[in-house]
Amino acid sequence: MKKYKYITIDDDPHSHLAVSYHFKNYNNYTCSAIFYNPEEALKYLQENEIDLIFLDIEMPEMNGFQFLEALKKDIFVVILTAYHEKYSVDAHKFYEENLIFYSNKAQLLYYFPKIIARFEKLYSEKEMLDRVNQLSKNEVHTFPKKAKNQTIPLVNIVAIVVFGHNIVLKMKNKEEYIFRMTFGELKKFLPANLFFQIRRNVIINILHVTAFNDITVCLGEYHFQISVKKHREIISELQTAKQKLSQ
């Protein structure tokens, strides 16, 4: 089970106790430190690695938003405040940065499982993106064309099916996007150690492979047959790639 470390930052001792109490059934979480002064927390974070921060807003030395602006590390943050409505608009802009949840302290009991579920989901996705960046020698991490005016992270592509001069991107969220692109154009930018051609018109993303045998590769709900002529070579490549991902 994945182990996580968190800290709490609040000038109210009862808030530290409340967060600690709610973690009593989560044995894979460790409280590394508690802080009554946000400035002391910033100093601590310069030398220590933390996964999650529980943060108050109204504090005398520095408020929670000033802390977030000064925070230079990519750490997930949960804001717990007694003045939920008062600061909701100000909190909204931080959702594009570190903030993953904003809650009233009085509702922590209700929201705590949701906070943990959201944190672990986002942490897992971030871990996958970091692994892609480490493994891929290709500096391109987004598809060269947009869908619905949004960029398409390569990590979210489960498989690519080629039909003549058209390709179909099968996405993690089950959506499909069709683009006009040749197989040659496609292969130029795909990281070769993440995307594998398993038959003439199918390329799969190793990150989403859930199982495979000599005949079929499973990527969640997607199933694709492996080329009969090259199945031994393909299986060997998939096994090597999966081992690298697990290291």
Image (tube, rainbow, N blue to C red):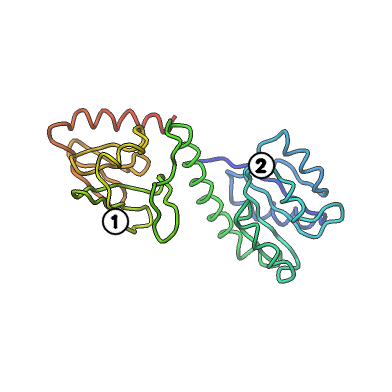
Classify mark 2: residues with Cα within 10 Å, few (<14), some (14-19) or many (20+): few
Locate residue 76 relative to residue 1 in the image: left or right: right
| Amino acid bearing label 1 | Ile
Up-down: is 176 above or below 53? below
Closer-to-camera residue (146/219)? 146
Residue shown at 24% from the left, 48% from the top: 161
Q: Which residue is mark 1?
A: 178
Closer-to-camera residue (8/137)? 137
| Amino acid bearing label 2 | Lys
Residue 204 picture quarter: top left
Q: Which residue is mark 2?
A: 73
Classify mark 1: residues with Cα within 10 Å, few (<14), some (14-19) or many (20+): some
Of mark 1 and mark 2, the one earlier in the sequence is 2
Instruction: Give me the disc on residue 241.
Output: none
- Circle nearer the viewer, 1 or 2: 1
Residue shown at 52% from the left, 41% from the top: 2
Up-down: is 246 above or below 51? above
Closer-to-camera residue (82/205)? 205
Residue 234 placement (x, y as % from top left) = 23, 32
